[in-house]
Amino acid sequence: MKHVKLKGAELLNNPKYNKDTAFSAAEREAFGLEGLVPPAIDTLERQLERVGHHLDAKSSDLEQYIYLMSLAGRNETLFYKTLMSDPARFVPIVYDPTVAYACLAFGHIFRHSSGMYLTRDMKERYLEVFRNWPVKDVRFICVSTGGRILGLGDIGANGMGIPIGKLQLYTACAAVPPESLLPVLLDIGTTNAPLRADPLYLGLRQPPPEDDEVDAIADAFVAAANEAFPGVCIHFEDWKGVDAMRLLDRYRDKILCYNDDIQGTASVVIAGLTTAMQIKREKLTDQRFLFLGAGSAGLGISNMIVSALVQQGLSEEEARERIWLMDSKGLIESGRQDINRWKRRFAHEAKASTSLLEVVKTFKPSVLIGVSTCGGLFTDEVIKEMARINQQPIIFPLSNPTERAECTPEAAYTHSGGRALYAAGVQFPDVELHGKRFHPSQANNFYIFPAVSLAVYATRPQRITDAMFIAAAAATADQVDQASRDKGMLYPLQANILETEVTTAVRVAEFIFEQGQASVERPVDIRAWIEGMLYSPEYRNLLD
Ligand SMILES: O=C([O-])CC(=O)C(=O)O
Ligand SMILES: [Mg+2]
């Protein structure tokens, strides 16, 4: 029985079912494909080999990105086969850092549409517009306004590369079925005037509205999404920092949603810190945390560290005392009049200062985290001071892409005499220092959000909580083996990402069941049950 209704060119043009040269002779005959494809009948492996040659011939990572996105639009199976064949190689192409350069050039490199674009002027009609999407059972929407893309600031509709890339990682890293995923760019306009003036820009050419109107647009969007796709989980990504904080507060107890920049980033940092504690044989409750940057990531990490420290026995106040933040105006201290309510919670009695070095000297942090979006701010002197006050300073320059990192691994290892426990937001190459080889860790939320989403996909909870993200952090840290820890590696190997994230998802799913938050019945064997749901990049016989 044929379950695919498409025939001929229409079948070839459908990325979900297309096999290009891998259609069998019987399929070619049954689906009117004879003559439309070359006579050779390839296996998926042979096609993968050909993709490898195409990629090797590309002159830059951005060219590889463009090729891979075209492949995704033509043959989904081959695309995921490629990504999943070597995630450590391809994740940095379809995602950070290369996706950053793709977003900057989005209107210029645009080939075909993927996902949905909802604009502020469609506000009354989002439900009607959602009905244009061909799939009914959408389980995740990743939505950005483009208001703060990575460390690049507001790039409006150019930000669409991010929801697309994030959802591709759901599948590549955690085998969430791709048909359940919908990337959305919610176009509210952009503050980026040069971009609005670019003739090839593809978004609305107007500045964004005031907060009240942004909230009204978000409300309309959320309501329509839940009506069009009952049970959908909304993943907020790369909104302007204050929008992200405000809207997470607005929705987290009302709908199934999460904000990856706030909760995913916090979770991956806690995973890395947990491994660092195992390496140092110290307790998280004894650390002193200094943040450079107090946007959605900085505050999200700070809040989740508070929750983790409270779980480990501190009072909330004791936990907050251990966390200091600096923003672009300097140390967040109680005398500051210009800070929002989220920063206010971390304002301590302290001397005002705009110098990171000075704050490091007075506060004496054991952990230094950069989420400033400004490259190079962890100067050699700052690293030396961290190394003077700590036997093994923990230094996480998380800003991205590559040139925004607050310090390079070379600088961190050189100025700490090779003692730093280092993780950046992007993957840096290995560093050789005095005959010793260092492998810098990558503290990127891709270790977390695909796994949490897979757990949500399976268990269908009503809400997503910080505790689920803390469970994901613990599960991730537990998967760093002793040999890796001995090398100072803070995260599991990327080559095994699928195995790692499925294990993390199983742990999070167990936690969701334990908390009584699942809306499906608990299976006897959670792992086998989840494994039965995983997407696998293989062709199906269309004649079955
Ligand atoms: O995408 C990444 O690599 C991390 C992230 O969420 C961000 O920087 O906004
Ligand atoms: Mg992000």
Image (spheres, rainbow, N blue to C red):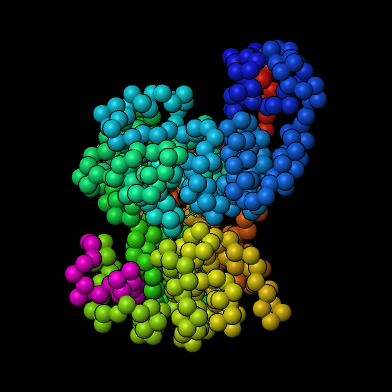
Q: Residue at x 63, y 14 (%)?
A: 7
Q: Residue at x 33, y 71 (%)?
A: 326
| Residue 342 falls left or right of residue 393 | left
Task: Name the residue: 49% across, 32% down.
Answer: 113
Which quadrant holds residue 334?
bottom left
Q: Nearer the viewer, residue 205 or 80?
A: 205
Q: Is residue 449 above or below residue 1?
A: below
Identify the residue at the far right of this view: 40
* Residue at the limit of the structure toward the bottom, as seen here: 388
Question: Can you give x and y, in whole percent of width and height, for residue 502 in the image?
Answer: 57, 47
Q: Is residue 50 magenta?
A: no
Is residue 101 rendered to the left or right of residue 49? left
Residue 365: x percent and y percent? 41, 79
Q: Quadrant of residue 4?
A: top right
Magenta residues span 321-341
Give 371 or 543, whichever is nearer the viewer. Answer: 371
Q: Quadrant of the C terminus?
A: top right
Q: On the picture, is 358 further left or further right than 453?
A: left
Quick one: quadrant of the N terminus? Answer: top right
Q: Position of residue 282 (x, y in %)?
A: 48, 77
